Image: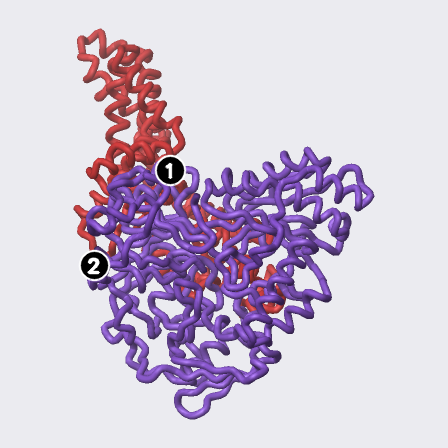
Chain colours: A purple, B red
Amino acid sequence: MKNTSDENTIIHGVSRREVLQGATAFGALAMTGLLSGRPAAAQPKQGGVLRIGMGHGATTDSYDPATWDQAFVQVFATARHGYLTEVAADGSLVGEVAESWEASPDAKVWRFKLRDGLTFHSGKPVTTDDVIASINHHRGEDSKSGAKPIVQEIVEMKAEGDDILVFTLAGGNADFPFVLSDYHLPIMPSADGKIDPTSADGCGGYVVESYEPGVRAQLKRNPNFWKTDRAHFDGIEMLSILDAAARQNALVTGEVDVIDRVDLNTVHLLKRAPGIEILDTTGTQHFTFAMDTRVGPFDDNNVRMALKYAIDREELVEKILNGYGAVGNDHPIGQSQRYHADDLEQHSYDPDKAKYYLKQAGLDNLDVTLSAADAAFAGAVDAAVLYSEKAAAAGINIQVAREANDGYWSNVWMKKPWSAVYWGGRPTEDWMFTTAYASGAAWNDSFWENDRFNELLLAARAELDENKRRDMYVEMQGIVSNDGGVVVPMFASYVMAHSDKVMHPEVVGANWTMDGFRAVERWWFA
Amino acid sequence: MVNSIWLMIAQRLGLGLVTLFVISLLIFGAVELLPGDIAQEMLGQSATPETVAAFRRELGLDLPAHERYLNWLGGVVQGDFGNSLANGRPITDLIAGRLGNTLFLALYAAAIAVPLALVLGILAALYRNSWFDRAINVFTLSSISFPEFFVAYILIFYLAQSGLFPSIAKITPDATLGEKLYRTFLPALTLTLVVTAHMMRMTRAAIINLLASPYIEMARLKGMSPGRIIVKHALPNALAPIINVVALNLAYLITGVVVVEVVFVYPGLGQLMVDSVSKRDITVVQAASLIFACAYVLLNLTADVLSTLSNPRLVHKR
């Protein structure tokens, strides 16, 4: 009940009638559970300072987009910066700094037209040089950027006239404009072909007033912001509140207006508090158990299939996510995505089938070790233990190895043969597959190679015909699901909470937490 | 004899410097032993071999460990703690504000806890074995036995959710002293509850210990009131152990309050240290741990000087 397949956002505790009666009635009928409707979008109003309590943030954070890795810096970046493109709340792509774009027939050369008259907070106009420098920050030998792999496909960037930018790619990519919406790629002012990674200057809706990494950021509205229907708050105050209970207390006692990462163990209690609304979105965030398909026993697909049938997905969604999520089907494409394979057979818990596949592999029982730590995702160790309990019925003995949170990504992930993994997800099928499933990809964490899949991946990437693309992506999801080295048990919702004074549009972005990081721009006070 | 105290201070300061040097070596070695380095930890899941290598080159992490340590030490000797490896900010700036916050909270908590513990300890000694003594003991021992975050949550539940005090200790640089005291009252109260028992019990025990001495017996025979005996005769002789316990607890208030900082979102040194260790930002870790070590060295020294001064037999050596 916590999510549906055709919508990516649900607002809890509000019935249609209340909404029609007006915004003041919000939340009065909290706890009614299922909804019959969604709030009619009221006209956004200007004003107020939005105070956000974020569950991330560290003293080591910085203004350098190369090292951004969590929601505090991501939301903060989106508040002050503009990007070439933006993933809208409904998952489609709209222009931001880029006004329009067009591709060559082979999708290899892309021409972007920049919007006229944009300026940075400092007053400097946004030029093609700034865009090129902003992207180049992530390219080349000396790049330490987490975004280096995604801009690697760019062979050349050059300006044509004042406002046209031409990207030449190594191969065709029909989804290339989506890549430019990545949170690592804000447009920053440049000097001598380089951006200053210690500068807060941007062309977004808010201007930074003060920032203390790991503690707090304060911003005020950019009076020259080009979007007239966005950035409704006079100011933004972001606080880093790492402790889940402290975050909830801050919301309940009115110290902040919005919090993210609501503790799923106590969300039912928070829901009962007066004047508080829970908001959850299910998009592309998913949790996986990745096997190294180069080594035994995982090199045998029968073993992989046995393991896929030995996990109780419903139970994991119910117990680990407290219902805030959806079951996965052993591929990384979410139900709300454009080319999701709706008709693909759903893998479900079936010990007999698991036994059958073990037999096919010539085994009576199986001993495997699953490495997990809560650094992989919250509840990963518990999920692994539940998996182990259920798999025993199929003669599969899963030893759960509890690893240290510290250094998990450098010492366990892609080092141990089978480990728990977290994926924030990517807005397009191609991006997700290219990142973690393509042959030789840096983060192909199952070291999986499938010729047909790799062939389809290249063909689909350059294909501009919708229907042909859809067929290819559906086939690829089938291949990953039935041959891939990754068990994808569940898609996890982003769960946030806000006071009933905070209003948001009907459709809330599900691509990332906090309305695709853009709550600061899209939301308003009643 | 006053000279001998100065000599002792000089000796102890010299030894303190040696201690700091050893600690910096130990910390450096310990962080080196941790799996992963700052490049891997900062990039996390999105690390690739090339980007990690580029990161290391930029920070000079490709140099051997002893060279990096000597470079760092050379800077520190000249008073330059260097920059944070993670975001390039000068460490002196980074730490100055945090240290100020930590000291403020520690002093605030101590200003409540020390007088409270002494008074309660004296009263408990005075009315030893009475219901009052027992009640005080049960209360302080229970509050020290609960984990800090639990005490903090209980206080938030009763004092913050009712709206009396803010649940997060948000400090802005332009806040007035009154505002600061109000906003940090709950963390200070939590720390008070955590440290009071130790000091109070030591005060009580030290005084009761002395009450069996012949000179107290004498005072009692003179017809002195029990309160006067304790304050005038017992307390001055019990000061040495009490001062030591107070110093230990002060040091704890400066170095060990990360849990309270997290629960009340208070930007102190503890959280800085935790962030820096988890990202392997070794220059910041070194600077923060040197400050913590200094706190222990200086407070212990102060305690020793004060307990020497409180004991005429040590001051007037023959």
Query: Nearer the N terminus, badge 1 or badge 2?
Result: 2
- As drawn, is A148 to the left or to the right of A28? right
- As drawn, is A403 to the left or to the right of A1? right
In the picture, residue A195 is in which quadrant?
bottom left
Identify which residue, A228 or B279, lies in the foreground: A228
Image position, residue B116 (x, y; %):
25, 29
- As drawn, is B145 to the left or to the right of A111? left
Toward the right, the furthest residue is A362
Q: Is residue B7 visible?
A: no
Image position, residue A377 (x, y; %):
52, 48
Q: Quadrant of the N terminus of chain B?
A: top left
Identify which residue, B280 or B167, lies in the foreground: B167
Residue placed under numbered mark 2 in the picture: A48
Image position, residue A69 (x, y; %):
47, 60
Q: Are marks 1 and 2 in contact (CB under 8 Å)?
A: no
* Chain letter of the residue carrying label 2: A
Q: Residue at x 27, y 51 (%)?
A: A257
Crowding at dot 1, Cα within 10 Å, few <14 / some 14-19 / many 20+, comes out as few
Q: Which mark is residue A268?
A: 1
Identify which residue, A151 or B277, lies in the foreground: A151
Amino acid type assigned to the residue bearing label 2 in the image: Gly
Name above or below for residue B75 compared with residue A413: below
- As drawn, is A355 to the left or to the right of A282? right
Toward the bottom, the furthest residue is A161
Secondary structure beneath dot 2 equals: loop
